[in-house]
Amino acid sequence: MTQTVEELFDSGLERYKAGESVETLIPVFQEVCDRSKKASAAWTCLSWLYLLADKPAAALTTAQKAVKLNPQDPQARINLALAMLDTKKAGVRPHVEIAQQICMAVSELQDEVMNNIEDGLTRKPNWKSMERVKQWLTE
């Protein structure tokens, strides 16, 4: 029996939280994105996985899609900022500032973003772009 898009997404998230490698999860989230092209959360997750896998060009493309689908998602904005830093693109700071404004308005989102930043730094220590974005967010 084929999993629904929601089941596949939820399963992928659980596998990620359990510590499964990003390389094995990228195809899972790519399938979710292929099957549900307007699922901004799936695009955000896929861009995050690409960032963790040191694939910034792919992360940039998927993060741009996530932000286009949901401009009010601070994690999508953070992912886009990280991908832009990692690919040496200009115009990073406005995305961080928008994410910061959204997080100020909704404290649960701020907690989620900060937890994701810590998770990212745990999974990819010495991630210079992430350290820079974290510093901007906490100024």
Image: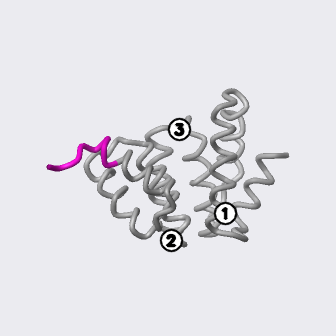
State the residue at coordinates (49%, 57%): 18
* Residue contact at pointers 2 and 1, CB within 8 angstroms: no
State the residue position of label 3: 71
Q: Secondary structure at mark 2?
A: loop
**First in sequence: mark 2 or mark 1?**
2
Crowd class of label 1 (few under 14; some 14 to 19; many from 20; radius 10 Å): few
Q: Amino acid at mark 1?
A: Thr
Question: Could you tell me the amino acid type at mark 3?
Answer: Pro
Q: Residue furthest top?
A: 105
Q: Quadrant of residue 112?
A: top right
Which span of residues is magenta-colored? 1-8
Tag nearer the camera, 3 or 1: 1
SS at mark 3 in the image: loop
Horizontal side, residue 22 vs residue 127: left or right: left
Estimate the spatial distance between the alpha carbons at disc 3 and disc 1, rounded to whole Å. Answer: 27 Å
Residue 96 coordinates in the image, percent (x, y): 69, 47
Q: CA distance from mark 2 to mark 3?
A: 22 Å
Res. 62 mark: none
Q: Which residue is mark 1?
A: 122
- Amino acid identity at mark 2: Lys
Q: Position of residue 116 (x, y in %)?
A: 63, 50
Q: Which color scheme did the rendering employ for the protein?
A: one colour
Q: Measuring from the top left, give residue 19's x and y in whole percent.
A: 51, 61
Disc ID at residue 55 = 2
Label 2 to label 1: alpha-carbon separation: 18 Å
Looking at marks 3 and 1 on the same chain, the residue that comes earlier in the sequence is marked by 3
